[in-house]
Image (cartoon, rainbow, N blue to C red):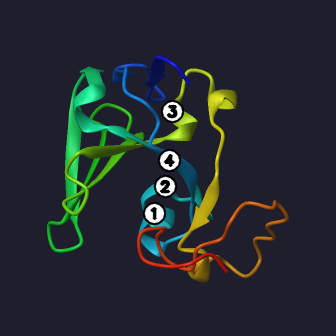
């Protein structure tokens, strides 16, 4: 993707990521669905230290304090997912990209939690959990 730029709904929070995209995919887990009020969400991972932020981010800790979700303090747009198990990565939401068409997913994660009424017809690998913990279906 080269230099990656994005922002929240109201434009108060912006980011520029200069690091490479480490992975990109769709997450079907229940906590991501609830955090985004959607049947799945699409993320990509970048090195945490490659992201420069503008504006004020608020934080929500979940999963016994192991996950930090950051969002715009003004409009509430979800901006990041950060897990203690991956301290060098920040996961950014594809829908916050200035040009969401840049996003090229490579897999589905936590596919075992997919909602039964969501019909997926792409040929991407489908991992029942995260790609770090399971083989594709």
Q: Is residue 68 above or below residue 126?
A: above
Residue 63, position in %: x, y? 24, 72
Residue appearing at x 68%, y 66% in the figure: 125
Residue 96 circle label: 3
Alpha carbons under labels 1 and 3: distance apart? 15 Å
Alpha carbons under labels 1 and 2: distance apart? 6 Å
Alpha carbons under labels 4 and 1: distance apart? 17 Å
Residue on which disc 1 sits:
32
Of circles 2 and 4, which is in front?
4
Residue on which disc 2 sits:
36
Seen in the image, is 60 located left or right of residue 96? left
Residue appearing at x 26%, y 37% in the figure: 48
Residue 131, position in %: x, y? 49, 68
Of circles 1 and 2, which is in front?
1
Sequence order check, earlier mark of 1 and 3: 1
Residue appearing at x 19%, y 51% in the figure: 87
The kind of secondary structure element at disc 3 is: helix
Residue 92, position in %: x, y? 42, 41
Residue on which disc 4 sits:
23
């Amino acid at each position: 993707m080269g230099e990656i730029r994005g922002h929240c709904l109201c434009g108060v929070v912006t980011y520029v990521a200069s690091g490479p995209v480490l992975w990109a995919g769709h997450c079907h887990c229940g906590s991501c669905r609830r955090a985004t009020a959607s049947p799945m969400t699409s993320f990509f991972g970048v090195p945490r230290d490659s992201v420069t932020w503008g504006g004020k981010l608020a934080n929500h800790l979940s999963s016994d304090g192991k996950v930090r979700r950051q969002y715009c303090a003004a409009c509430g747009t979800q901006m990041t997912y950060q897990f203690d198990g991956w301290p060098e990565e920040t996961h950014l939401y594809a829908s916050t990209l200035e040009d969401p068409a840049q996003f090229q997913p490579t897999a589905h994660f936590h596919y075992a939690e997919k909602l039964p009424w969501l019909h997926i017809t792409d040929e991407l690998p489908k991992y029942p959990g995260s790609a770090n913990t399971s083989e594709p279906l």
